[in-house]
């Protein structure tokens, strides 16, 4: 096998695409791409990272907060060893679970309906199968959606959140070199003098 570890950008794309699948939207159109944003993303130069909304109050927008968290699972690792292709060195394999709490914060006049669709969408088999391909698994139960209006520049913005917890399978590998040779120093004493001889032993 190989390492199974994702970058922040790869994780963002997984959640972006899964929401588009839940909403039955095409992720490739410019208009739809503006619908899903990250408050702090892999592209820190993007205006999507601004602290103040860069969209209009009447636009339907989903902000995704991906928050790694501690738990009983991600503090444990299963360590094993495998031979590499040369059958000479070993590979140390570290398999563990990362826990992600993901908040889907929906803004706009239809925020409630879109949040509800996201909550129900993660119960669908086709969505779970998509996540499984990328080693993500929904942790039930999924909490109820929450209406949390947000005060921005003296105006109340409609906001409805849904929070979902995911387990992510992670596999890390590191090569452990085998011992190829050993240097041995032999020492004897003859007539009161130390005689030293170095011998290099090769391991085949």
Image (cartoon, rainbow, N blue to C red):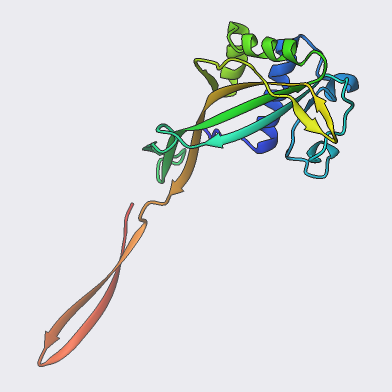
Furthest toward the bottom, the residue is 192
**What residue is at 35 percent from the left and 55 percent from the top?**
179
**Residue placed most toward the observer, 43 or 101:** 101
Vertical position of residue 182 compared to residue 174: above or below: below
Name the spot of residue 70 as percent of width and height, x first.
48, 37
**What residue is at 56 percent from the left and 36 percent from the top?**
68
Query: Is residue 81 rendered to the left or right of residue 169?
Result: left
> How many discs appear?
0
Furthest toward the front, the residue is 154
Query: Is residue 82 rendered to the left or right of residue 42?
Result: left
**What residue is at 83 percent from the left and 33 percent from the top?**
53
Furthest toward the left, the residue is 191
**Residue placed most toward the observer, 130 or 20:** 20
Name the spot of residue 30 as percent of width and height, x first.
89, 23
Query: Is residue 135 rendered to the left or right of residue 106?
Result: left
Vertical position of residue 172 compared to residue 195: above or below: above
Q: Which of the 4 image quadrants contains residue 21?
A: top right
Name the spot of residue 189 as percent of width and height, x first.
13, 85
**What residue is at 81 percent from the left and 26 percent from the top?**
156
**Residue placed most toward the observer, 141 or 160:** 160
Name the spot of residue 182 as percent of width and height, x first.
31, 63
């Amino acid at each position: 096998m190989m390492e199974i570890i994702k970058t922040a950008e790869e994780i963002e794309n997984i959640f972006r695409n899964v929401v588009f699948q839940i909403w039955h939207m095409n992720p490739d159109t410019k208009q739809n791409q503006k619908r899903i944003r990250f408050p702090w993303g892999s592209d820190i130069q993007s205006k999507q990272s601004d602290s103040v909304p860069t969209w209009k109050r009447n636009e339907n927008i989903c902000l995704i907060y991906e928050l790694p968290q501690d738990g009983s699972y991600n503090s444990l690792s299963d360590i094993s060893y495998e031979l590499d292709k040369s059958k000479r060195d070993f590979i140390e394999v570290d398999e563990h679970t990362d826990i992600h709490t993901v908040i889907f914060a929906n803004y706009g006049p239809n925020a409630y309906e879109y949040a509800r669709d996201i909550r129900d969408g993660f119960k669908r088999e086709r969505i779970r199968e998509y996540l499984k391909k990328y080693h993500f698994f929904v942790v039930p139960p999924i909490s109820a959606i929450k209406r949390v209006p947000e005060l921005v520049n003296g105006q109340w913005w409609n906001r409805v959140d849904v929070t979902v917890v995911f387990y992510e399978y992670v596999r890390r590998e590191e090569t452990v070199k085998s011992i190829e040779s050993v240097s041995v120093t032999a020492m004897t004493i003859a007539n009161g003098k130390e005689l030293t001889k170095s011998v290099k032993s090769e391991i085949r």
